[in-house]
């Protein structure tokens, strides 16, 4: 069975300018097999030197669930349920914070949202 992942932006931070501060994610679904690894790209523009990036997971009609946050590199918090297989490194040079999921499971089929605060 295929595992379908979709990346999306959750919301804009009310304290930032949409023209200068935004998160960009490629459109479309990623469809992979169980056991494979996935990377969901996330690029951001920010006037802040210290953006806080967040990833959330939403499956079905449930509310989005917090996955992890990153301040810089690997620093930040990861929810206990996701520590084993979900990774993210905030790269301020390339302004990217891709979400990497290892050993995909059927339960990983969901929409993955990124957002940020500055």
Image (spheres, rainbow, N blue to C red):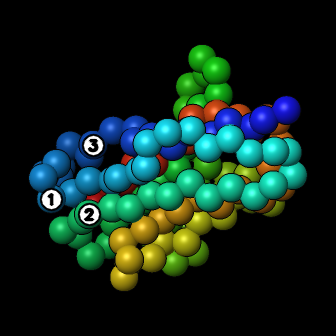
**Quarter of the rendering containing residue 12:** top left
| Residue in the foreground of this view, choosing between 27 and 45 | 27
Quarter assignment of residue 76: bottom right
The residue tagged 3 is 12
**Separation (CA) of disc 1 from disc 3:** 11 Å
Q: Is mark 3 on a helix, strand or loop?
A: loop
**Residue at the (62%, 44%) spot, across then down:** 30
Whether residue 75 appears in this view of the structure is no
Q: Are marks 2 and 1 in contact (CB under 8 Å)?
A: yes
Disc nearest the viewer among 2 and 3: 2
Quarter of the image for residue 57 reads: top right
* Marks 2 and 3, the one that precedes in the sequence: 3
Tell me which residue sits at (21%, 57%) in the image.
Answer: 21
Q: Count the marks.
A: 3
Residue 3 in picture, x, y percent from top left:
75, 37
Residue 51 numbered mark, or none: none
**Visible residue check, residue 105:** yes
Q: How far apart are marks 2 and 3 (CA)?
A: 12 Å
> Along the horizontal axis of the image, is 58 left or right of 116?
right
How packed is label 3: few (under 14 Cα within 10 Å), some, or many (20 or more)?
some
Q: Which of marks 1 and 3 is nearer the N terminus?
A: 3
Q: Is label 2 in a helix, a strand or a loop?
A: strand
- Residue tagged 2: 45
76 or 21, which is in the foreground? Answer: 21
Residue 64 spot, x, y in % from top left: 55, 32
Q: In which quarter of the image is the C terminus?
A: bottom left
**39 lies left or right of 115:** right
Q: Residue at the spot x=38%, y=77% of the render?
A: 94
Q: Upstream in the sequence, badge 2 or badge 1?
A: 1
Q: Where is residue 90 in the image (x, y as percent from the top left)?
A: 48, 71
Measure the C-alpha gap from mark 2 to mark 1: 6 Å
Residue under numbered circle 1 = 20
């Amino acid at each position: 069975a295929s595992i379908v992942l979709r990346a999306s932006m959750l919301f804009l931070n009310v304290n930032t300018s949409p023209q200068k501060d935004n998160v960009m994610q490629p459109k479309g679904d990623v469809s992979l097999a169980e056991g494979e690894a996935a990377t969901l790209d996330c690029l951001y523009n920010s006037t802040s030197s210290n953006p806080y990036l967040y990833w959330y997971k939403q499956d079905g009609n449930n509310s989005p669930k917090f996955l992890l946050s990153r301040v810089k590199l690997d620093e930040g918090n990861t929810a206990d349920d996701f520590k084993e297989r979900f990774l993210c490194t905030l790269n301020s040079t390339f302004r990217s914070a891709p979400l990497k999921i290892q050993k995909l499971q059927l339960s990983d089929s969901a929409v993955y949202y990124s957002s940020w605060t500055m």
